[in-house]
Image (cartoon, rainbow, N blue to C red):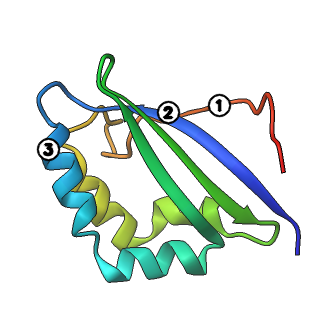
Amino acid sequence: MDKEIVAFKMKLLPGKTAEYKTRHDQIWPDLSDLLRKAGISYYSIFLDDETNILFGTYTATSDNTIEDLPNHPIMQKWWDHMSDIMETKPSNQPVSEPLKSMFYMK
């Protein structure tokens, strides 16, 4: 099964670093299960303290179902839970910009 590495950026609201970390340290098991079932693994999020930019990366299987996640009630509930601490769309989905791969070393 082929896999691809996906990278993206999001924006944390000022002063929300500790709360963002706390919420992710307590990530819901049903959300983690949902992401795994969708074909996501090795999911990491990093923060640039100077800009409040969050940089995320994960590995996705070639047969992933990531495009179905926005319609799932667990995903929508998580977005609602996070909407007060990061930039979001009207649906509470985080504003996320894909990043282009420029280099990868095995």
Mark found first going from the N terminus, 2 or 3: 2
> Identity of the amino acid at label 3?
Ala
Q: Nearer the viewer, residue 22 or 86?
A: 22
Residue at mark 2: 9
Q: Nearer the viewer, residue 66 or 41?
A: 41
Spatial CA span between label 1 and label 2: 7 Å
Residue at mark 3: 18
Q: Is residue 17 above or below residue 57?
A: above
Residue at mark 1: 99
Which residue shows up at 82% across the image and 43% down it? Answer: 105
Q: Quadrant of residue 36?
A: bottom right
Label 1–label 2 contact, CB within 8 A = yes
Mark found first going from the N terminus, 1 or 2: 2
Structural crowding at the residue carrying mark 2, measured as other residues with C-alpha within 10 Å and reported as few (<14), some (14–19) or many (≥20): some
Q: Is residue 51 above or below residue 102?
A: above
Residue 48, position in %: x, y? 37, 27
Q: Is residue 102 above or below residue 61?
A: above
Spatial CA span between label 2 and label 3: 18 Å
> Identity of the amino acid at label 2?
Lys
Work out which residue is located at the far front of the displayed protein and give it. Answer: 106
> Identity of the amino acid at label 1?
Leu
Work out which residue is located at the far right of the displayed protein and give it. Answer: 1
Left or right: 84 as drawn, with respect to 28: left
Which residue shows up at 32% across the image and 36% down it? Answer: 88
Front label number (2 vs 3) = 3
Spatial CA span between label 1 and label 3: 25 Å
Q: Quadrant of residue 80?
A: bottom left
Structural crowding at the residue carrying mark 1, measured as other residues with C-alpha within 10 Å and reported as few (<14), some (14–19) or many (≥20): few
Label 1–label 3 contact, CB within 8 A = no
Work out which residue is located at the far top of the displayed protein and give it. Answer: 50
Which residue shows up at 82% across the image and 66% down it? Answer: 62
The answer to whether residue 16 of the structure is visible from this angle is yes
